[in-house]
Amino acid sequence: MRTPLRPLSRRGLLTGTLGSAALLTMGGSLAGCGTKGAQQTEAGCVSEDLSGTEKKLAFANWPQYMDVDDKDESKRPSLDEFITKTGIQVTYTEDINDNNEFFGKVQNQLAACQSTDRDIIVLTDWMAARMIRLGWIQKLDPAKIPNVQANLLPSLLNRPFDAENRISIPWQSGLAGLAYNGNVTKELRTVDELLTRPDLKGKVTALSEMRDTMGLLLGSNGHDPANFTAAQFDDALNKLKKAVDSGQIRKFTGNDYAPDLAKGDIAACIGWSGDVIQLSGEDEKVRFVAPDSGVMLYSDNMMVPNKATHKGNAEALINYYYEPAVAAKLAAYVNYICPVKGAQAEMEKIDPELAANPLIFPDEALLSKSKVFMALDEKQEKEYEGKFQQVIGA
């Protein structure tokens, strides 16, 4: 078992092997969105691909979202293997810590059809959808990513912001649901329990990611997070506001809820599956709950921004990570849902317990309870985010 050396992150690192039974109980503000003149078109912002003559690639990702060698943290086994196999030199940076923060880093360049000096960026569904809407992302060539065409999980096909999988390819996926520490509280099964149970008052956190928190609340009210009305959103928001006003919810967090949950400083929360796998490796009484009302499914997506000059090399890397054996090696480290068919069989060779973990390889029962948050247009995004921020006090 490996003990975490760094603070826990939404993109958690592997802390050990664990069984599925202990894990699963079945039962930010907008930054510059829609700036005048920001919209680009494929014809108006043409990118040149130099992959034929330049064997290099700049890859920007989240911290702790790539497998690392146990004995030498400067080595990234799967990425090093790609470099050796292809001769493409990869500059790998962990400079994405928050979707909105990263948007702020690159929006001026992309709005002006200028290079960001990155060939691959990895962003969550809703931010990917925003950038696609703004025309800031290059289309991929399906012929150059055959492994994606063959191996992408069916549950990740036909997403509303990229129905043909031509612009954004899932790097890893995850679930937002409930979690609790069984050392300090009894079993938790529903969103309503989290928001109202007297013994949890002041010992609860929720996520500052609007789509995850509000998606779960919409589901708990019997509404569909993938297709809801403004009135239904307000209904769920009122429910959240009551929990805030009553003191039931202590605070809203990013991934920093995880250490507090591990220590028992909070008893329960809305949290992410990957974090809970990591925590459960240290303490099996920390558990993830998929309430009957549903869980939220999200992906962090590989995309090639406009003016990136190595799209062909990026496509080679994307295709490589959709080889099942490579995907399994990555999933064994990062602990999120592996988006690649065939990787579960390869994981059997690495770690049979992880291969049986439904939070890495969900079965149909769990996937049938998962929803991807409704794609929002610019007006809806501003309206819903604004209302949510008011309630959470951001």
Image (cartoon, grey):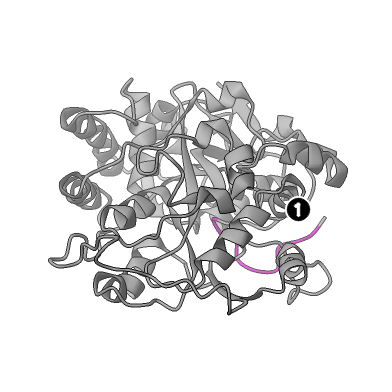
Judge left or right: residue 360 versus residue 205: right
* Membership of 320 in magenta stretch: no
Location of residue 34 with respect to 26 vertically, above or below = below
Q: Residue at x 84, y 71 (%)?
A: 71
Mark 1 residue crowding within 10 angstroms, few (<14) / some (14–19) / many (20+): many
Q: Position of residue 271 (x, y in %)?
A: 50, 45
Left or right of residue 110, residue 330 in this image: right
Identify the image quadrant of residue 191. Answer: top left
Q: Position of residue 276 (x, y in %)?
A: 61, 45
Q: Residue sitting at 27 percent across and 62 percent down? A: 43
* Magenta highlight on residue 3: yes
How far across and down, in percent of the image, does residue 102 sit? Answer: 38, 68
Which of the two residues, 313 or 250, is positioned nearer the viewer here?
Answer: 313
Q: Residue at x 30, y 71 (%)?
A: 110
Between 117 and 336, the residue placed more toward the observer is: 117
Q: In this picture, is 80 found above or below 211?
A: below
Do we see residue 264 in this rendering?
no
- The residue wearing badge 1 is 329
Image quadrant in which you'd find residue 371? top left
Label the magenta part by its dominant secondary structure: loop
Residue drawn at (16%, 47%) of the image: 383
Q: In the picture, which quadrant includes the N terminus? A: bottom right
Q: x and y percent of residue 98 in the render?
A: 42, 63
Q: Is residue 364 left or right of residue 37?
A: right
- Type of the residue with mark 1: Lys
In this rendering, does residue 71 appear at all? yes
Where disc 1 sits, the SS reads: helix
Indicate left or right for 364 with 207 as reference: right
The span picked out in magenta is 2-10
Question: Which quadrant of the rendered structure holds the C terminus?
Answer: bottom left
- Residue 236 sits in quarter: top left
